[in-house]
Amino acid sequence: CQCSAQGSRYTSCDHLTGQCVCVPNVAGLRCDSCANGAYGFPNCQAGTCHPAGSVQYVVPPPVGQCECRRHVEGPACDTCKPLYWNLSPDTSDGCTNCECNVAGTISGVAECAQGSGQCHCKPNACSGTCSTCKDGYYNLQEQNYFGCQGCQCDIGGSAGQSCGERNGRCRCRPNVEGPKCNLPRPDHYFPDLHHLKFEIEEGTLLDGRPVRFGYNPLEFSDFSWRGYAQMSPIQSKVLVSVSVSSPDLFHVVLRYANRGGADVLGRVSVIEDTWSYYCGNCSEQSKQIVFAPSVDSTFVNVPQNNFVEPFVLNPGTWTVVIEAEGILLDYLVLLPSAYYEAPILQIKVSEPCSYSAVPEANPNCLQYRYLSLDSFPSISGNDAGCRNDNHLPRPCPTERVTPRHPDMAVCSGFDISVELRGRLPSAGDYALVVEYSSEEELPQTLAVAVNMPGSRTHEHRVNLLHCKY
């Protein structure tokens, strides 16, 4: 049970919850702290000033007459003032400054949680004071609605998704450069998917003669290089020599055309050049293939399903033997495993979607949406009245920025007052939520006054950030 010897009546506790039996003015599972409103454990006294938050005298004054330390408030001096936290007797002024970085806090609020000191960070900012960007983000800015912008490092050219805190420069892989690691170094190039490409019309027949090939655009409209091999009973097998620089598991991709209207069965075999194709017991790798009918040129992948092992090729020169009749073959491609597996190439989408009329450079974005407030009392911008300078109020012009946005009162110009009138269902404490859209790059300050009949006017200020979301 571990019940406190000073704060509990017994050493035993509840068999289900573990709750100890506490003496008066003591609380906690193990009876090791004062109850709410009492201070000075283990001699907890109710109705006294909090010793950590009040100036101590020989004769303690009653609650309501406590003299609080500089950063403390409340009748019993038991609460830190806004912008402060961590009520402690070791702090000269009673509480510690929150030290929130308002550039990284929601709505520029500098208050923090009383117990932990954690400031209220924007979505892409972090740390206790909201002073740094999350991993994968940079450039903390007060006018940025999300706090920081995404690094957007190239998924293939960067060595990770993090970047410089200030300049946003990504960490590049060898022979890659650029702020986003999307450019090859001078005298280098990026290989494409068909990097290991071999023209079949450059191959030979079994007797060493060159491959018979055609070059009629009407027969094969967009063939590459010199032409395409014509597979027929006269030429049913072609040999293509390929070079492999590093060991890997390869797929073979064939570009072909089959206008016969029916499936054509074929076979692809790969033989290392140290062996002879004519030997009877060669350890060749051979896989059957189906060339489906096609109106235009298309591709087929060998092996054609995941249950068949790919080709295992070591460094050196290999011969690929293709057997088929009644089709046209353009070229073959060796695909290393990194090309068809690619488990790490997952783009990190970091930028929010916007309604900007200018098309975004990156089509991938995050679609944010606020929690619905439909069940709470609200006042529509359609019912707003606008007053310019000293003129009489008139209905505000309204605009719907996008079909997703509601009708909103348009506020443009200087010295504009917008008046919204509404009726509340009941009295109580309310938080005012202002829904807006702003294309201004710099933050704007909005003065808000709430008037109620027979009550004082509540005046506040609201920071409006650049918001085109």
Image (cartoon, rainbow, N blue to C red):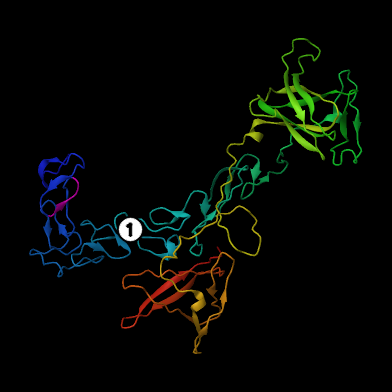
Image position, residue 434 (x, y; %): 45, 70
Q: Nearer the viewer, residue 113 or 258?
A: 258
Look at the picture and state if 295 lies above or below 426.
above
* Residue 106 sits in quarter: bottom left
Q: Residue furthest front?
A: 262
Q: Residue furthest left?
A: 59
The structure residue drawn at horizontal position 33% and vertical position 56%, both measured from the top left corner, is 117
Give the residue type at disc 1: Ala
The structure residue drawn at horizontal position 48% and vertical position 74%, both measured from the top left corner, is 380
Image position, residue 292 (x, y; %): 77, 33
Q: Secondary structure at mark 1?
A: loop
Residue range highlighted in magenta:
25-29
Image position, residue 280 (x, y; %): 77, 10
Horizontal relation, residue 299 to residue 176: left or right:
right
Tell me, yes or no, whether the highlighted magenta stretch contains residue 231. no
Other residues around mark 1 within 10 Å, as few (<14) / some (14–19) / many (≥20): some
Magenta segment, prevailing SS (helix, strand or loop): loop
Horizontal relation, residue 91 to residue 401: left or right:
left
Quadrant of the drawing holding the N terminus:
top left
Camera sees residue 154: yes
Q: Residue furthest bottom?
A: 391
In this figure, which residue is indicated by the disc labeled 1? 113
Quadrant of the drawing holding the C terminus:
bottom right
Camera sees residue 93: no
Q: Nearer the viewer, residue 344 or 139?
A: 344
* Residue 275 sits in quarter: top right
The number of numbered badges drawn on the structure is 1
